[in-house]
Image (spheres, helix red, strand yellow):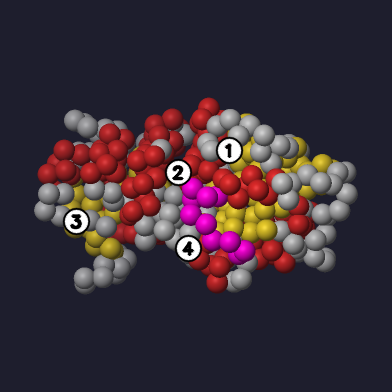
Amino acid sequence: MTNKIKVMIVDDSALVRQVVSQAISRDPGIEVIATAQDPLFALDKLKTLSPDVLVVDIEMPRMDGLSFLKRIMAERPTPVIICSSLAEQGAQVTMEALAAGAVAIITKPKLGLKSFLEDSSNDIVQAIKAAARANLRALGRSAATMANRQPPEVRPKLSADAVLSPASHQGAGMYGTTDRIVAIGTSTGGTQALEAVLTRLPAVSPGIVIVQHMPERFTAMFAERLNGLCKIEVREARHGDRVMPGRALIAPGGKHMMLARSGAQYMVEVVDGPLVNRHRPSVDVLFRSCAKFAGRNALGVIMTGMGDDGARGLKEMRDAGARTVAEDESTCVVFGMPKEAIRLGGVDSVLPLDRIPDAILQSARG
């Protein structure tokens, strides 16, 4: 009993509190210790309770969920999952919640709410389990300075083979160009980590391709937000976009993104395909394409995230001659993806978040 993940649900809808409580309580590893109809009631209960994870709506009376999130992250950092109908619209407030420290987003519709919550109970359970493993120190630090929805475990876990075959030999595609590219993969906690890295890069930086596990509709808004903060151009990738210095391309939610070559230039292909490692976009797909078409002209970076997506692809990049970096556990919100990449032998350097921008700039110098 003592090892159960303790959850508090904060939502003004009695139906949501009831259905979510019943759904997640079916998992023997999770216990709902409290519910509250608004943040002020929740703050009162938090005087005597210490939940491991908070599930929070955005639209609530007396105090909105975003203000509550910011207060929680400032006073007592706790993993927060946003469960809101605003997320269905890809609202700006949801992106603000991710920047403020929310570790996952669950989209709930305004209609058919009860059936949706029941059907999505496994998604919510997986998000709670991922959030419970968050590094609170890193989580609080990220929120002070500034999805992902986890697919159901029952889905088959495909490898990158389902989208792209491996390189026929090491270093294929590295000849005929001197362009340098950087590939970054991240998941839980990655929105804050990417902001910390990209905002420190000068306008003249190597071309960057990014997979951040994030639902559809959010990636374009996330890229737009970063573009307003960074010296480099940041945008959601379109099929055929060129990878060029001073530009970062973020894979669209719901699509795979791969590096490709057009003569001596790099470009991206944005394609449909099955879930890889239960994700679309998948970091493994991006990293494999970089191994295949960039070889030693690439730098691979794997940062905070739950699971192992990208670990095998980073090993393939290293085998093809690329330099590879994993974020250090001390700054990761969730030390899952980097840990697995290190275990597989795919990592040259393990660096804290504040040293990754320098590694990117060094890669441009070869």
The residues tagged by marks 2 and 4 sit, at their Cα atoms, a distance apart of 16 Å
Label 2 with label 4: CB-CB less than 8 Å? no
- Does the segment drawn in magenta span residue 263? no
Q: Residues within 10 Å of mark 2 (few under 14, many from 20)?
A: many
Q: Is residue 79 left or right of residue 344?
A: left
Pointer 1: what residue?
A: 201
User: Which of the labelled discs sits on residue 336, or is there none?
Assistant: 4
Residue 192, which numbered label? 2
Closest to the camera, between mark 1 and mark 3, is 1
The answer to whether residue 109 is seen in the rendering is no
What type is the residue that disc 1 sits on?
A: Leu
Q: Residues within 10 Å of mark 1 (few under 14, many from 20)?
A: some
How many numbered discs, if any? 4
In the figure, residue 320 lies in which quadrant? bottom right
At horizontal 71% and vertical 37% (from top left) the residue drawn is 245
User: What is the three-letter code of the residue carrying label 3?
Assistant: Ser
Whole-angstrom CA distance, mark 1 to mark 3, is 39 Å
Expressed as whole percent of the image width and height from the top left, the position of residue 41 reads: 14, 41
Q: Nearer the viewer, mark 1 or mark 4?
A: 1
- Amino acid, disc 2: Gln
Answer left or right for 200 relative to 249: left
Kindly report the distance in space between the C-alpha atoms of the residues bearing marks 3 and 2: 24 Å
Q: Position of residue 124 (x, y in %)?
A: 38, 54
Relative to 9, 163 lies left or right: right
Q: Secondary structure at mark 4?
A: loop
Q: Secondary structure at mark 3?
A: loop
Comes first in the chain, label 2 or label 4: 2
Q: Which residue is mark 3?
A: 50
The amino acid marked with disc number 4 is Gly
Q: Which residues are magenta?
A: 347-356
Please tell me how crowded label 3 is: few (under 14), some (14-19), or many (20+) other residues with Cα within 10 Å: some
Determine the residue located farthest toward the top in the rendered image. 228
